[in-house]
Amino acid sequence: MSMEDYEMFEMPPTERRIVHRITEKEKQEFGEEHSKRYGFGSVKQWRTVMMIEANLGYKFSGSSYWDLKDFISKYFESAKRETFELSGGSLGGDFY
């Protein structure tokens, strides 16, 4: 069984310690269970929801496919903003 670098945490970010490493099997089971329970969304989308919930602590509370898509896209939008923000700006110069 392979393990990925996704982790579930119980403590605040300043005191994080690994409680459990989520396996591929657990992600697959979560995706299959939730796609059947809710009746919408793919297994892959529900696996993404699991990773967002486990790593960031957000909880999905929607009731439609569009709520699911919004939940996932909000995470990716915030991640994209954080990735492309430059702290302090650039004073010029050559880039290598």
Image: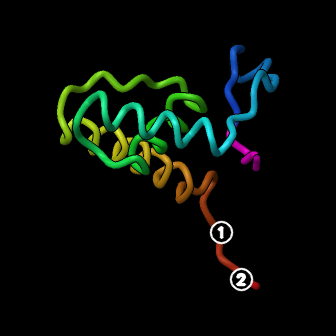
Q: Which secondary structure lies at badge 1?
A: loop
Q: Split into 4 quadrants, where in the image is the C terminus?
A: bottom right
Q: What's the residue at 75%, 26% (across, down)?
A: 20
Quarter-wise, where is residue 61 in the image? top left
Q: Residue 13's x, y, as percent?
A: 70, 23
Q: Quick check: 93 above or below 61?
A: below
Of discs 1 and 2, which sits in the foreground? 2
Q: Position of residue 5 (x, y in %)?
A: 73, 45
**Residue ID at (53%, 23%):** 57
Counting other residues with Cα less than 10 Å from the Cα at mark 2, is it few (<14), some (14-19), or many (20 or more)? Answer: few
In depth, the one of 37 and 15 nearer the eye is: 37
Q: Residues within 10 Å of mark 1 (few under 14, many from 20)?
A: few
The amino acid type of the residue labelled 2 equals Phe
Instruction: Please name the residue that numbered disc 1 is placed on.
Output: 91
- Seen in the picture, residue 8 relative to 88 is either above or below; the reply is above
- Closer to the camera in the image, 8 or 57: 8
State the predominant SS element of the stretch in magenta.
Answer: strand
- In the image, which residues are magenta? 1-6
The percent position of residue 7, horizontal first and vertical second, equals 70, 34
Residue under label 2, please give it.
Answer: 95
Count of number-bearing discs: 2
Q: Name the one closer to the observer, 55 or 35.
A: 35
At x 69% / y 22%, what residue is drawn?
9
User: Relative to 60, is 52 on the left or the right?
Assistant: right
